[in-house]
Amino acid sequence: MKEYKNFINGKFVDSKSGRTFENRNPANWDEVIGIFPKSNAEDLNMAIEAAKKAYPRWRAIPLPKKAEIMRRAAEIMISKKEEAARLMTREMGKVIKETRGDYQEGIDTALYAAGQGRRYFGYSVPSELPNKICFTRRDPLGVWGLITPWNFPVAIPSWKIFPCILSGNTAIIKPATDTPASAGELVQVLYEAGLPEGVLNIIYGGGGEIGEAMLSHPDIVGISFTGSSDIGMRIGEVCGKTLKRCSLELGGKNGQVVLADANLDLALDGVLWGAFGTTGQRCTATSRLIIEEPIYNKFIEMLKARVEKLKLGNGLDETVDVGPLVNKGQRDTVAMYVDIGKKEGAKLLTGGEPYTEGECAKGWFYKPTVFIDVLPTMRIAQEEIFGPVLSVIKAKNFEEAIKILNGTTYGLSSSIYTNDLNKAQKAAELAETGIVYINAPTIGAECHLPFGGMKNTGNGHREGGWTAYEIFTEVKTVYIDYSGTLQKAQIDTWQE
Ligand code: UN1
């Protein structure tokens, strides 16, 4: 067990609060992974001061030079991948193959940032007047607050940290209290790679205390948050009052459509991975399966057989398919939604109870659960559960399937399985989601493409790829008039 400290201005420091919290393994709650400071506003103020002080110097370093630090960070991450993946599995429970993938997403994001340092493009645009040029450039904003969730303990902090600081900003990250160690180790990688002190600072503690203090602090220029829609709305409201930039990556109620002409075996592999990968704890998880009527009964039968074969257990065991939920609260939420589903009249096909066999008795395990004959209006078809619960809905035809697919307040990811090219293209056009998959599950976005959602899933920003850099920068439009005369746009017109 390790005792962690906040990392401010390039140094480990105790919290002024004197309080701590524990982080336990969700697959075995007897195992304490680390003790962390439960920080307060005073700690945050210190971190903000450090980030403010570091900003002018960091901002002035040429981007390709900053990018070298990102490349070195990627190299260090490559060497630490296995160790980091094991820590991540112990922290939040998902299986080792997935935590390796999570860390790989972090490595890829670092490498993308390393390349981006030499590809930081703006536009060059002709002027309507002679002897005048116009172009755009992107500049940083200042000190950012990054608030990250526990389900992707390295990938999501990486999505935010690398574009934020490569662009010349400085930052304070507050990771989720369920996965503080993985984020802490990532911050150390950046310092090992040569990051100047104060550019990135980490503060551990609860969202209620640190998050709120970040929102109201006048020296924080922007907040990047991934988490629930309820908290996102609160963040948006507070940021709105002070016109702070805020990028919100929120909930999902993602649907997979299976049309009658689809390759059913492929669709089955897809829904198993989409619904029960990460124990259903992804914003992109498949939580609704919409099946076209002619194949409804057949597909349900196929699904039941496979779901019941999924192996639960400690994620460090390479043969395990599904790990525990992250904590007691999350398992209680799942149990609550299972009760709601039953009361609403959906039919439980399989699962519907905690799993307590053998060593799993000491973890937050819950059986992969499928409800069938779910109506699109039921709460289990509308609300984000964030657990291994799949709601199966019958659709008469393609048109009705799309209507059901779009019939929630969320809009992150969607999937359609069909061999009909026209229907696949039409679905891509009509889906009210930021990500659409054709013949692939709702999870598995790649880090170099825009990631984000419509409706209550966010506020229009996209992480990942080049669009992440739009979040963390201001566009500046520069006009250079080299005519030596006063040229009035829209008034003086060009003449031969
Ligand atoms: C999330 O759950 O917030 O597309 C992120 C995916 C992963 C990222 C999920 N690459 O499923």
Image: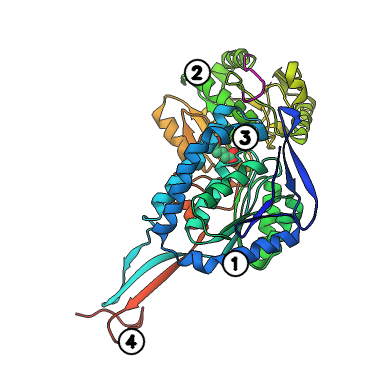
Q: Position of residue 325 (x, y in %)?
A: 70, 30
The kind of secondary structure element at disc 3 is: helix
Residue 472 in sight in this render: yes
- Helix, strand or loop under label 2: helix
Would you name the residue on which mark 1 appears? 52
Q: Where does label 2 land, which residue?
A: 264
Q: Main secondary structure of the magenta part?
A: loop
Q: Is residue 340 above or below residue 452?
A: above
Mark 1 or mark 3, which has the lower sequence index?
1
Whether residues under marks 3 and 2 lie with C-beta atoms below 8 angstroms apart, the answer is: no
Rounded to the nearest angstrom, the CA distance separating label 3 from label 2 is 37 Å
Up the image or down, 221 lies above or below 408; here it is below
Residue furthest bottom as drawn: 485
Mark 1 against mark 4, which lies toward the viewer?
1
Q: Quadrant of residue 377?
A: top right
Look at label 1 and name its amino acid.
Answer: Lys
Q: Earlier in the sequence, mark 3 or mark 4?
A: 3
Residues in magenta? 309-316
User: Depth check: 33 or 303 in front?
Assistant: 33
* Residue 274 coordinates in the image, percent (x, y): 57, 28
Q: Secondary structure at mark 1?
A: helix
Q: Which mark is residue 338?
A: none
The amino acid type of the residue labelled 4 equals Leu
The amino acid type of the residue labelled 3 equals Leu
Asked if residue 301 is positioned above or below residue 161 in the image, the reply reads above
What distance separates the C-alpha of mark 1 from that of mark 4? 40 Å
Q: Which residue is mark 3?
A: 87
x 52%, y 21%: residue = 269
Between discs 3 and 2, the one toward the N terminus: 3
Instruction: Determine which residue is flagged by label 4.
Output: 486
Q: Earlier in the sequence, mark 1 or mark 2?
A: 1
The C terminus: image quadrant: bottom left
